[in-house]
Amino acid sequence: ILQKVPNEYWKWAIYDFRSPSLFFLKECLGTWEVEEQSSLQIHVRFTYQLVTAHWIWSPLCWLFAQVQWRGMIKRAFTEIKVQAESEEVLYYDIKRPSGE
């Protein structure tokens, strides 16, 4: 988590990929913006950007985003919904990449 304003905005990054199958990715940047629509409904706007390690990997990155990444995000939202509907409190430490 790079930046967090509770109940409004999250900015996050994934980097230092260790899986050999993700050799083409340098980092993934994302934001979540939340807006309360009513007492029982929240609108979430999620955007992300996959950054390739080299421009030549752009087509592979696009395919990954269309197939694998979307599936991962759908599963994440399912898990987030379960957590949000539970009574558990969830905290994350904000960590910044070295060099910032």
Image (cartoon, helix red, strand yellow):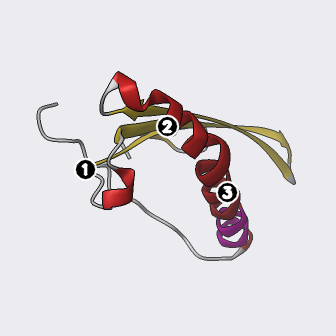
Image coordinates of residue 94 in percent, x first then y, are 32, 49
Are the residues at dot 2 and dot 1 in contact (C-beta closer than 8 Å)?
no
Kindly state the secondary structure of the residue where label 3 is placed.
helix
In the picture, the disc for residue 61 is 2
**Outermost residue toward the top?**
55
| Disc 3 from disc 1: Cα separation | 21 Å
Q: Which residues are magenta?
A: 78-84
Is residue 83 inside the magenta stretch?
yes
Residue sitting at x 21%, y 41%? 97
Tell which of 82 and 57 is nearer to you.
57
Q: Of helix, strand and loop, which one carries label 1?
A: loop
Q: Residue at x 37, y 32 (%)?
A: 52
Percent x, y of residue 21: 38, 57
Point 61% across, 58% down: residue: 72
Of label 2 and label 3, which has the lower sequence position? 2
In the image, what residue occupies the spot 16% across and 30% down? 100
Task: Classify mark 2: helix, strand or loop.
Answer: helix
Mark 1 is surrounded, within 10 Å at the Cα level, by few (under 14), some (14 to 19) or many (20 or more) other residues, namely few
Q: Quadrant of residue 4?
A: top left
Of pointers 2 and 1, the one earlier in the residue sequence: 1
Residue denoted by label 3? 71
The amino acid sitting under disc 3 is Gly
Name the residue type under label 1. Asp
Q: Position of residue 61 (x, y in %)?
A: 49, 37
The label number, if any, that marks residue 16 in the structure image: 1
Tell me if residue 35 comes above or below residue 73 in the rendering.
Answer: above
Query: What is the C-alpha distance between the residues marked 2 and 3?
Result: 15 Å
Q: Circle 2: is it few (<14), some (14-19), or many (20+) Cα within 10 Å?
A: some
- Residue 24: % across, % down: 36, 41
**Residues at marks 2 and 1, CA–CA distance in whole angstroms:** 16 Å
**Residue positioned most to the bottom:** 87
